Image: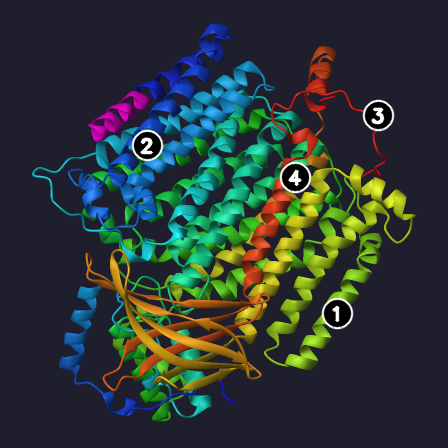
Amino acid sequence: MTKNEGLMTGGEGLGMSPALFRLCSVLCLLSSVLCHEAAAVQPDEVLKDPALEGRARALSRELRCMVCQNQSIDDSEAPLARDLRILVRERLTAGDSDPQVVDFLVARYGEFVLLKPRFEWQTAVLWFTPAAALLAGAIAIVAAIRRRRTAPQTVAPLSPEEEQTLAKMIEPK
Amino acid sequence: MNAEIGHYALVLAFALALIQSVVPLIGARKRDASLMAVAEPVALVQFGFVALSFAMLMSCYVGSDFSVSNVFENSHSATPLIYKFTSTWGNHEGSMLLWVSILTLFGALVATFANNIPRSLKATVLSVQAWIAGIFHLFILTTSNPFRRLSPAPFEGQDLNPVLQDIGLAIHPPLLYLGYVGFSIAFSFAIAALIEGRIDAAWARWTRPWMLAAWMCLTVGIAMGSYWAYYELGWGGWWFWDPVENASFMPWLAGTALLHSAVVMEKREALKIWTILLSILTFSLSLIGTFLVRSGVLTSVHAFASDPARGFFILCILVLFIGGGLGLFAWRAPLLRQGGLFAPVSREGALVFNNLMLTAACATVFVGTLYPLALEALTGEKISVGAPFFNSTFGPLFASLLVAVPFGPLLAWKRGDLPGVAQRLAGAFLVALIALAATFVFEGQPLLAPFGVGVALFVITGAITDLVERTGLLRTPLATVARRAAGLPRSAWGTAFAHMGLGITLLGIVGETQWGAERIVSMNPGDKVSIRNYDITFDRTANRTGPNYSELAATFTVRRHGETIGVMEPSKRNFAARQTSKSESALMARGVSQLYLTIGDVNPDGSVAVRLYYKPLVLMIWLGAVVMFIGGGLSLSDRRLRVGAPRRARAGAPAMVPAE
């Protein structure tokens, strides 16, 4: 049995005119983050073909609901997210590959729609951070070890009284 | 009257903070005992006034005094009593007041219990605490006053945001703030050490209990928040890499690194400068976290500017404390001397690796969270950085750290024997390998799952191996084992439990993300849906009314192999005061797994949209955090860490403990 099974109530027929779409977007913006009018993925959105639906779900998780705060369209309850989910499914049903669907959405909504930004010059810093942080840390550690090995110990030892106080403080009897 | 008393108490607390931030510091510089002695009583009284102020705000909420603007905006006369209490901090102003309450509470605790530290250090620490408290009092008084009155007073309030009307609000923010603010003690100790210009192993011993307590609260605070989001938001997610979550996660990562580096400092006098720097960074991240959430900068760069006074004040605080702290560090740290040499392969080396990975992971989360804001501010370009980015960058970093976790506690100080440790971990490795193979055979792909299970079991059995090795289980008579176990330092138990908790959480994450099942269907009463051998029948819907909402509840009967095992009742609530609705999910625990059910709107034909999930092992995610908390508690109860514990003569001969 497949993981997703649902009823189709004419999901393919929900293509909207651009004007209607714009109106919807405005309404979404008005309702802003508190989009509780509908639940995320609705039964009528689910595609019959489980493989296609699986791809749609995977894609949805990588796409941002633009009127919500950091939610993917898969999670979001906003009407705009529903429109995008249906759009993704339409493109997939029409035979688009995953990258084609993503390109289509980026062309329409900009890079903002991607939850995982593409590697470009302006996201280079973002993508290099983990490696750079590791490398910088490793270099700092190696440098510290080298310095410690070569530097003579010039610290003045504690006076006997100080040693005693310290020992007392560290070793509570 | 109450609001005015609260307001005035806060002004008095601010005045006391000013005294406390100057007088003891001068005393410490001049070695004047009477000036230093000002610190303790003032810290206690300051806490008293802040607590009074907080209690007054709470009384306004409980008494539904809508003439107070803050109460009007966030409460309603029909709100259940428990939420009247909790809505005190369910808003910006109130939560800042909770923040300073906890801050001054920690100050009062230091004043009362930190009696084994030098006078001048204690006085300086309390002064630094008062700097933080003072600036926050001022912030609240000038930009976020919760006691502002409305005239004329409205008859009814606007009610608390329905999402916040949950027991989660009672627990999550206070725990989180205990964690955030707890790290202020480490910060104050670090600044004091830099001012004094001297630092030694004892410093780590004095500060570690505070770090541990803060870390414990932050751990369960984050876990609690995650569980709250899981059952409250209605789509079964438990971690979203949302900036608000990241804001609490970054101090946790840095704080975890700090706990470990402080161990090296305490035992071996090494990593002193690094520990000081980490103390400053951890609290800086706590401050950034507080403000990321509070300033509205996250929703948009423009939201930040919409309240210029607040935004500007926030920036000033960040610059002052982070910039000031790091500046002081750059100036004074060269005066501090390093001690304790060690070989790369040693307990110290392992802890340095831990710090490297945690810091890199923290940097990744930091840049990922703030990069979109920075890019938009600089170029106007809008990008999103969400869960897929963090999973593919933070994931590998943390996974490689986890593989190394079992090695750390088994390595000896100064110079470790890696092949020897590997040999002792052979059993754990074997268990992990068998689990990996079994998972692969029975569950197959995705390939991530078997490796996740393997790593998780390696971490868990590795922690157990450490205990087995230390007590000599399987090698020595049971009586000896029992004696050794009793004599084992509590911190050793703490380490083992905390590490085990990590493995348990990982197991839960793997189960939930890799093996979960989901059904999204439209159902009419009488319909049946099946998921993983559970048959769920939709019986009926009923309209009900609660204290401040009306709801449509649906009843489902759950059967397994034809046998009824329970009823689940998800509902859809409408809150009249705010004109919003909210979905209430129904959960049914099966061992550590859960069935999760939510309903959507009723369709015109009478059918209901139903979302049903089976979430295998999901409870282990939070169970792991609880085990980590217990580990922290065990470590905290270790004899040598007990703050101000009376020095008792040891009864009888100490139990035999294998040398570390």
The residue beneath circle 2 is B55
In the picture, the quarter occupied by the C terminus of chain B is top right
Q: Chain of mark 3?
A: B
Q: Amino acid at mark 2?
A: Ala
Front disc: 4 or 2: 2
Distance, label 4 to label 1, CA atoms, is 31 Å
Q: Is residue A18 left or right of residue B610?
A: left
Q: Amino acid at mark 4?
A: Ser
Q: How is the image coloured?
A: rainbow
Distance, label 2 to label 1, CA atoms, is 56 Å
Q: Amino acid at mark 1?
A: Leu
Query: Where does the magenta region start and end?
Result: B1-14
- Labels 3 and 4 share a subunit: yes
Front disc: 3 or 4: 3
Camera-nearest residue between B125 and A155: B125
Secondary element type, mark 1: helix
Ranked by sequence position, the earlier of labels 2 and 1 is 2
Pointers 2 and 1 in contact (C-beta within 8 Å): no
User: As displayed, is residue B556 above or below residue B313?
Assistant: below
**Residue B6 shown in magenta:** yes
The residue beneath circle 1 is B433
Residue at (57% x, 40% y) in the render: B258
User: As displayed, is residue B155 above or below residue B323?
Assistant: below
Distance, label 3 to label 1, CA atoms, is 45 Å
Residue at (67% x, 59% y) in the render: B403
Give the number of the disc on residue B635. 4
- Labels 4 and 2 share a subunit: yes
Front disc: 4 or 1: 4
What number of labels is visible?
4
